[in-house]
Image: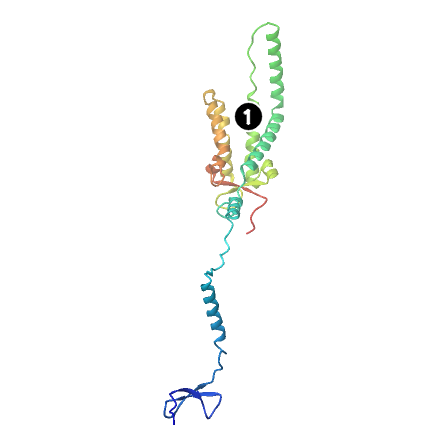
Amino acid sequence: MTQRPSGWYEDPDDPDQLRYWDGILWSPRRMPKVKPGLERSGPVQDLRGRSDSADRGVTLRPSPRPQSDPWRQQGALLQAPVTTPDGDVLAGWWHRAGAAIVDYLLVSLIGALVSLPWTLDWARQHSDYLNTVSTWKGSGQVPYPPWQLFVADIVVYALYEIGMTVWRGQTIGKILTGIRVRRSSSAGSPGLGAAVNRFLVKCVYLLLSFVPALGLLAIVFVLLDYLWPLRDPKRRALHDLSAHTYVVRTRGQIPR
């Protein structure tokens, strides 16, 4: 009789089980019978597929990750508005320039109306002087514009600029261009001290213009003051830096 070698065989007591034969006796060790190819079909096919790919020299590479568009990122950075530390969008230079032009025209018109009596008197004197020179009756003295004209402009400008800034942080020009003046420490309108500070710095050129030797310096100061927002990171003019104020937009603010 040929002796059966040791190994796993069908359990004589349970056809669904495998039982270990130690070469002499049946061992108590049993395990479920596994049909050939039932659980190995998936891994075998996967390994076979990899082997076939390797034999053909095909290299499997992961799909590239989507990369962000650098132009889109750059556009987002360029479109990001410049804001105050607490989030108010700062006014652009052209908005400020437009407001300054409107205010200048308005103040000049009101000042001219206030000083109209002195202006008419000066116009008559100037006309008489021209008639005198033209008829060779004498040289006479050139009539200068009346000082009341300059004083009226300064007084009207002071009342207009300071009063409107304290009241609502906006002159007529700023209302039309959608900007306003606010404190650097809070969103409120500047107080009287800050409004006077802003006005005095903006009017330095008027005081300097009365001194002939300083006339050129007055022009340089005006240019520096109004062009300073183009280089300042917070778009402040010299009078903003002196009074600790910002000029922000009233339209198009970022929702908070």
Q: Quadrant of the N terminus?
A: bottom left
Q: Quadrant of residue 30?
A: bottom left
Q: Residue 34: x and y, percent?
A: 47, 82
Q: Residue 155: x and y, percent?
A: 55, 29
Q: Quadrant of residue 175?
A: top right
As drawn, 24 above or below 83: below
As drawn, 51 above or below 63: below
Q: Which residue is mark 1?
A: 151
How busy is the neighbourhood of tag 1: few (under 14 within 10 Å), some, or many (20 plus)?
few
* Residue at x 62% of width, y 13% of height: 127
Q: How many marks?
A: 1
Residue extending furthest toward the top: 136
Secondary structure, mark 1, is: helix
Q: Residue 203: x and y, percent?
A: 50, 30
Q: With 3 as the anchor, is 180 left or right in this view?
A: right
As drawn, 64 above or below 229: below
* Residue at x 49% of width, y 24% of height: 209
